[in-house]
Image (cartoon, rainbow, N blue to C red):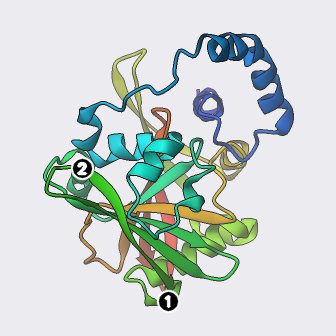
């Protein structure tokens, strides 16, 4: 049963095309299978100048999907003088939300939110670049500013330092997981919530299919509360698919540990 759940989750992540274990051959095969249809669509110009619906501005996530996937829209919705090159190759990206309270995840669905930051953390130089988006008086989202800072100057600096080691050092990762790792998922097939756990070898089987965060993390700040210094959660979300998985961490005995997963 346990191994079945591990591979079911891994398969779902593979379908989302965002895993560590996905190779170029898989992507090439998928690309080849779409060539004929893609050419046909291009010849028919079905999507040329397709208008972005006004509803895309109601929620930041809907706006951001259009912003990332449509270059002309990105140009239109960027304040003059700002660069948006960092978003050019991000349609297949996985975004993280660092939070402490489950209710903070509801901010993504809150139409009254008028300011959101997309933070790109580059582990190679410990820098964080914040892209600030604001809604104007007409209710339209725009990229309005950028800030470049060192990770040490962020409210979650200690946790991000841990995350860097967790995603780049496999030995440190294993030492930072509380095994058996509690895992909760909802089975739509059975219409029930399943509670189980992962042992180290089962974690290894899953790990290669998890999103690759070893070079950088893209984090979205909707205005989540930052209070606790001993409990953090990270939700990973696919931009163009419904993939969502949560990791819950606690700080005890001088270090952070992963104690639970949810999907």
Residue 11: percent from left, percent from top: 64, 28
Residue 261: percent from left, percent from top: 47, 49
Residue matched to label 2: 140
Residue matched to label 1: 152
- Which residue is rendered at x = 56% and y = 71% of the image? 121
- Which residue is rendered at x = 67% and y = 82% of the image? 125
263 relative position to 202: left or right:
left
Could one spot residue 175 in this view of the protein?
A: no
189 relative position to 214: left or right:
left
First reached walking from the N terminus: tag 2 or tag 1: 2
Q: Of all residues shown, which one is farthest toward the right?
A: 25
Residue placed most toward the observer, 234 or 89:
89
Residue placed most toward the observer, 7 or 47:
47
Secondary element at image label 2: loop
Relative height, residue 80 to residue 199 (above, below): below
- Which residue is rendered at x = 49% and y = 32% of the image? 241
- Image marks 2 and 1: residues in contact by CB distance under 8 Å: no
Q: How many marks?
A: 2
What is the quadrant of residue 13 in the picture?
top right
* Quadrant housing the C terminus: top left
Could one spot residue 135 in this view of the protein?
A: yes
């Amino acid at each position: 049963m346990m191994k079945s759940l591990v591979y079911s989750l891994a398969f779902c992540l593979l379908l989302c095309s965002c895993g560590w274990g996905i190779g170029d051959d898989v992507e090439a095969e998928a690309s080849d299978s779409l060539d004929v249809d893609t050419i046909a669509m291009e010849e028919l110009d079905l999507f040329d100048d397709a208008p972005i619906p006004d509803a895309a501005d109601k929620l930041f996530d809907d706006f951001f999907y259009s912003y990332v996937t449509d270059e002309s829209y990105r140009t239109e919705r960027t304040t003059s003088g700002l660069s948006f090159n960092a978003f050019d190759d991000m349609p297949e990206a996985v975004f993280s939300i660092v939070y402490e309270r489950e209710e903070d995840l509801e901010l993504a669905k809150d139409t009254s939110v008028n300011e959101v930051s997309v933070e790109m953390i580059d582990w190679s130089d410990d820098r964080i670049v914040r892209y600030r988006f604001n809604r104007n008086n007409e209710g339209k989202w725009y990229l309005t500013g950028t800030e470049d800072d060192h990770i040490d100057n962020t409210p979650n600096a200690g946790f991000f330092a841990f995350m860097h080691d967790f995603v780049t050092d496999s030995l440190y990762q294993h030492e930072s997981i509380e095994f058996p790792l509690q895992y909760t998922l909802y089975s739509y097939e059975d219409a029930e919530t399943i509670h189980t756990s992962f042992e180290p070898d089962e974690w290894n089987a899953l790990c290669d299919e998890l999103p690759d965060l070893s070079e950088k993390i893209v984090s979205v700040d909707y205005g989540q509360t930052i209070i606790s210094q001993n409990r953090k959660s990270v939700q990973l979300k696919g931009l163009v698919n419904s993939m969502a998985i949560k990791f819950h961490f606690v700080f005890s005995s001088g270090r952070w540990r992963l104690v639970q997963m949810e999907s």
